[in-house]
Image (cartoon, rainbow, N blue to C red):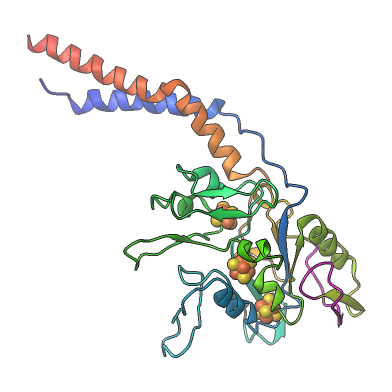
Amino acid sequence: MEIKRRDFLKVAAGGGLMLAAGSQQADARASLERLPDALGILYDATVCIGCKACVSACKQNNEMPPDFSSPDNLWDNPLDLSSKTLNVIKLYQDGDASSKDQEAGGYSYVKRHCMHCVDPACVSACPVSALTKDPETGIVGYHKNACIGCRYCQIACPYNIPKFEWDDPFPQIRKCQLCDHRIAEGKYSACCEFCPTGASIFGRVEDLLLEAKKRLTYEPGTYQTYPIGTVDSTYSVERKVTPYLNHVYGEKEGGGTQYLVLANVPFEKLGLPKLRELPIAARSEGLHHTIYKGLIAPIVFLGGLLYVVHRNTKKDE
Ligand code: SF4
Ligand code: SF4
Ligand code: SF4
């Protein structure tokens, strides 16, 4: 007995139709809300001077090895996030890059690390709960002993954050965990503590959002007070305000993030993607749960195959 290619395709098409019907009816599950005591970081690209003190502090405080991305192999100079680098300062530039924070003919820094999404796709995709969201702080943490190395989190993350240790015989996923070990000791994120300008500040996301929105009301050219280290710090600096795009990145993108960004160059040009407000996790979980509800699609597919086998066996007899 032989299953003809045409019969197989018919069954597969039937299964496909079921999948399509399922996806049409799939309702996204309710999005997770930002936790009242969620902790995070506000990064203001207009304040950043690109000194990379935050990158060094991150390495030192998270015991990360040097990353020799530069061709001369002389010093730790990461060009992007990797399994050795949890935080990186990247550069946007256009034309002769003569003016800071200008899209045309200018340049801008951007600090990239885990966004600590309000409704994280990596947590939703991980089949063994090796990635979890803290119920109080909202920090997205990683548990190496639970991880099976499937790397679903890498595929799921819309920001391309989790990195895999390809060069390690016992590989782990690496990503920023908001320095939760320091927070447990009463400190805060190293990248914020060692930022000399206040471009990166730590705090409750609610307070960071208020601070970000306040900055958007500042008149360019006026002098304003910018806190250093934490949003409620007693240390601050007076600086001349430069223009901002009227948007807080991370307030709503992908359901919101706990890492917020202000800039004057369009966020997409800084590598921050345009995302719908509905989190990817809410959409994909709704779809998967509909398709696999009662194992509908696999049962239809197997049932179809059994029917073809049965029919062909009868013909043979
Ligand atoms: S940015 Fe990526 S790795 Fe970080 S919490 Fe969001 S989905 Fe997870
Ligand atoms: S919060 Fe900690 S781990 Fe995350 S980027 Fe800052 S220093 Fe690195
Ligand atoms: S330490 Fe602060 S000013 Fe320096 S690169 Fe990092 S965010 Fe920018």
> Left or right: where does residue 311 sit relative to residue 134?
left
Q: Position of residue 64 (x, y in %)?
A: 49, 73
Q: Quadrant of the C terminus?
A: top left
Residue located 25% across and 14% down the image: 307
Residue located 61% across and 33% down the image: 28
Q: Nearer the viewer, residue 153 or 21?
A: 153
Q: Quadrant of residue 201?
A: bottom right
Which residues are drawn in magenta? 228-246
Q: Position of residue 148 (x, y in %)?
A: 39, 49
> Left or right: where does residue 281 sit relative to residue 118?
left
Q: In the displayed structure, would residue 189 be above or below residue 66?
A: above
Tell me which secondary structure the magenta stretch mostly adopts: loop
Q: Position of residue 164 (x, y in %)?
A: 42, 61
> Left or right: where does residue 237 sit relative to residue 268?
right
Q: Nearer the viewer, residue 96 or 160?
A: 160
Q: Quadrant of residue 165?
A: bottom left
Residue located 42% across and 60% down the image: 172
Q: Quadrant of residue 266?
A: bottom right
Q: Quadrant of ligand 1?
A: bottom right
Q: How many marks?
A: 0
Q: Nearer the viewer, residue 51 or 310?
A: 51
Q: In the displayed structure, would residue 8 be above or below residue 224?
A: above
Q: Quadrant of the N terminus?
A: top left
Does residue 13 appear in this view?
yes
Q: Position of residue 27 (x, y in %)?
A: 60, 29
Is 239 magenta? The answer is yes
